[in-house]
Amino acid sequence: MEGEFVGFFLIGALIFGCIGALLGSRVNIGFSSFWWGFFLGPIGWVIILLLPRGNQPKHTRNSQAKPENASLDNDLYRVWLVDTYGIQKNDVLDQYLCSGTLFDTIDLALEFAHSNEGLRKKNEADAKTYTVIWNAFKVIVAINLLVFVIKVFV
């Protein structure tokens, strides 16, 4: 009798988890939505639908896509930097303003924006690495929790 209950519970949790994963794929959340559905059932589904959407485009000042050739010799890239980082000439000070910093020439402001773009790209790569590690950790914890539950009830 006890084994039937555990089996029924696990099958139900798996079904709820699959529905959660389906909902999560619709709103670009990812596989973590499976665990919301698995552990919380319909309440987890509501949480999935209320979570911020994943992979939403970030709002930038410009609507142009970043040019493939990210070199300061490329005029399109230079224009993209000006639009993205809001580089403006301050006529009163006769200097260029980029991210709250003043520069004597436009070339210095563009080099500053270009270096910030490189740092932003590195930070995005680091964030992706940490996300992969964090997701792997969550899966390991969930598997261990599931094994614990099975051992307790079986």
Image (cartoon, rainbow, N blue to C red):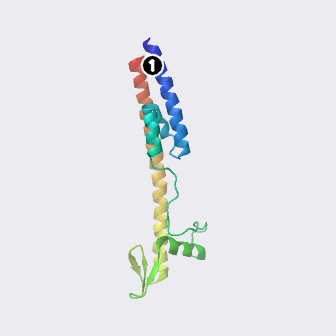
In this view of the protein, which residue sits in the foreground, 10 or 137?
10
Query: Which residue is found at the position 50% from the left and 66% from the top?
Result: 60
Residue 20 lies, in percent from the top left, at 50, 36
In which quarter of the view is residue 143 placed?
Answer: top left
Residues packed near mark 1 inside 10 Å, few (<14), some (14 to 19) or many (20 plus)? some
Number of numbered markers: 1
Residue 66 lies, in percent from the top left, at 57, 66
In this view of the protein, which residue sits in the foreground, 80 or 27?
27
Rendered view: 114 above or below 20: below
What residue did someone put label 1 on? 6
Query: Which residue is found at the position 38% from the left and 20% from the top?
Result: 152
Rendered view: 63 above or below 52: below
In this view of the protein, which residue sits in the foreground, 91 or 45?
45
Q: Quadrant of the C terminus?
A: top left
Q: Quadrant of the N terminus?
A: top left
Residue 128 lies, in percent from the top left, at 48, 51
In this view of the protein, which residue sits in the foreground, 43 or 132?
43
Q: Give the residue type at disc 1.
A: Val
In which quarter of the view is residue 74 placed?
Answer: bottom right
Callout 1 secondary element: helix
Query: Which residue is found at the position 46% from the left and 54% from the top?
Result: 126
Residue 149 lies, in percent from the top left, at 40, 24
Residue 74 visible in rendering:
no
Query: Which residue is found at the position 53% from the left and 34% from the top?
Result: 19
Residue 84 visible in rendering:
yes
**The furthest residue to the top:** 1
Rendered view: 67 above or below 89: above
